[in-house]
Image (spheres, rainbow, N blue to C red):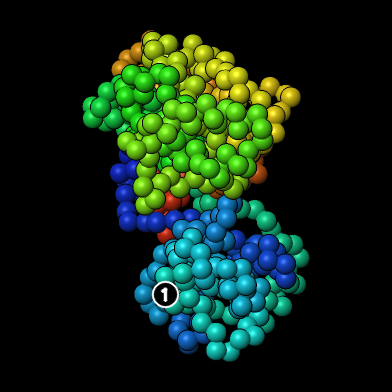
Amino acid sequence: MAATPSSHMPSYQQLLKACSAPYLSEPAPVELPDELSLQSLWFNGQFGKHFTDTEGRKVEIVQFGFWNHASGPDFLHAAIRLDGNRLSGAIELDSHTKDWENHQHHSNPVYNSVVLHVVFADLATTYFTRSENHQAIPRILVPPAKLEAAMQHPRFARASSSIGRCHYPLKRATESQVHELLQQAAHHRCQLKAKRFAATVQAHSFSQALWVALASTLGYSNNRDPMTLLAQRLPIHQLSTQQEFIPSLLFGVAGFLTSKSHSAAPEDTQSWLDTLWSSWWKLRTKYELSKDRAMQWNYSGNRPVNHPHRRVAALAAIASHWPKILSLSSSPRALAQYLNHLEDPFWNHHHTLQSKMNQKKLALIGKQRAHDFLINHLLPFAISQGQDDAQALYHQLAAPSKSQNIKRVAYRLFAENPVQEQFLRKAWHHQALLQIYQDFCLEDNSDCHSCPFPEQLKF
């Protein structure tokens, strides 16, 4: 980075104001005959951006979208123009036309968001790509000449994002200027989170806001929504009056106390479930959710320690110790330590309701979960309330492992410059990068070309 700034950097609020515009998403995928390689080449634009679909309509790729790292379509938040009409949604790549049905995409509602089906071999001349809700989906066949040319490319990049234009002004900036930019972005994010927490406090109470925030944190990204709904459907003031029924109520409303789960469980788990059922059968008439209101849990892509069963068990432990947790809420560091030491005799040695007993003791709430709760919920609110030492703790917390979004935006802003590591060490660094990602990358629908952010970085 350069030693001397070219001019004073605008504040983060000024950047947001200068860049306010109706944008939408960010960059995309890439590569060959095995589908991962074909996806990689596609993402890098090796097949171009202009095509003709099987109906003879012109297709332009406006925004390639983002790699989907879970089940579902290959690329999310994409944008295309179909005969000049803009469509936003997902893009799915398949080697052959009939893979759409062979892979059961046509009967899976997750694929209803697909706006473009890309194939590389079309063996079915009268085949139509349709979604689960019977909507026709445009399909393009990548021309053989483009495929052959792409296969001659000297290397197939697999990066999940591309270098942004903002990389160049940031490369010329001093380290102190970049530090100031990130600090302001983190502060802006902190204020937004504090406002969201405060809104729940105003609507209900501080106790309920704390309860919902803990449930949301325990859900990770995969099950944040159902965990939040669980905390809303069983408010903490209600659970606190039924201490002896807390596990039964949470597991019952979550939909985990069923005859199927009991029959599939090992013998020691069946004994534990019997204890819960002895209470739940009396309560279920009042609390059991109808089928159309049932929690939609995501069981795929979770590590065993993050299984929904364990997350609900952790929430039950929190509810059972609520007076102590509430009393520690004014001391965030002490609260995090208390959460780390919560235990449950059964869940200390079980991953799920179906798993066998694990001899190794399992942490009910890991250190990183507690820190995520602090950085995303409690500390922003505490800072907004002028709570002593909250700001210092906010800046002290170490960074968690890098998420896909962090990797993407760090590469966009810093490319492979080793200096980026000093801006990824603290949790607040990650918060800053995620805010920039949200405010600019996710609001840009031009694949970076027309994003106003780089021009505003006047160092």
**Snapshot quadrant of residue 274:** top right
Vertical side of 347 occupied by 172: above or below: below
Q: Position of residue 293 (x, y in %)?
A: 36, 48
**Snapshot quadrant of residue 83:** bottom left
Per the image, the residue denoted by label 1 is: 135
Locate the N terminus and report the quarter of the image it occupies. Answer: top right
Residue at the image point whose x is 58% and y is 89% from the top: 125
Query: Which one is in front, 441 or 336?
Result: 336
Query: Which one is in front, 253 or 129?
Result: 253
Query: Which one is in front, 378 or 447?
Result: 378
Count of number-bearing discs: 1
Q: Amino acid at mark 1?
A: Gln
Q: Position of residue 332 (x, y in %)?
A: 45, 15
Residue at the image point whose x is 52% and y is 26% from the top: 275
> Left or right: where does residue 148 sit relative to residue 277?
right
For the question of whether residue 169 can be seen, the reply is: no
Element type at mark 1: loop
Q: Position of residue 449 (x, y in %)?
A: 47, 59
Residue at the image point whose x is 66% and y is 73% from the top: 95
For the question of whether residue 232 can be seen, the reply is: yes
Vertical side of 158 occupied by 338: above or below: above
> Left or right: where does residue 35 sit relative to residue 271?
right
Q: Position of residue 150 (x, y in %)?
A: 69, 72
Vertical side of 135 occupied by 244: above or below: above
> Left or right: where does residue 232 sit relative to residue 224?
left
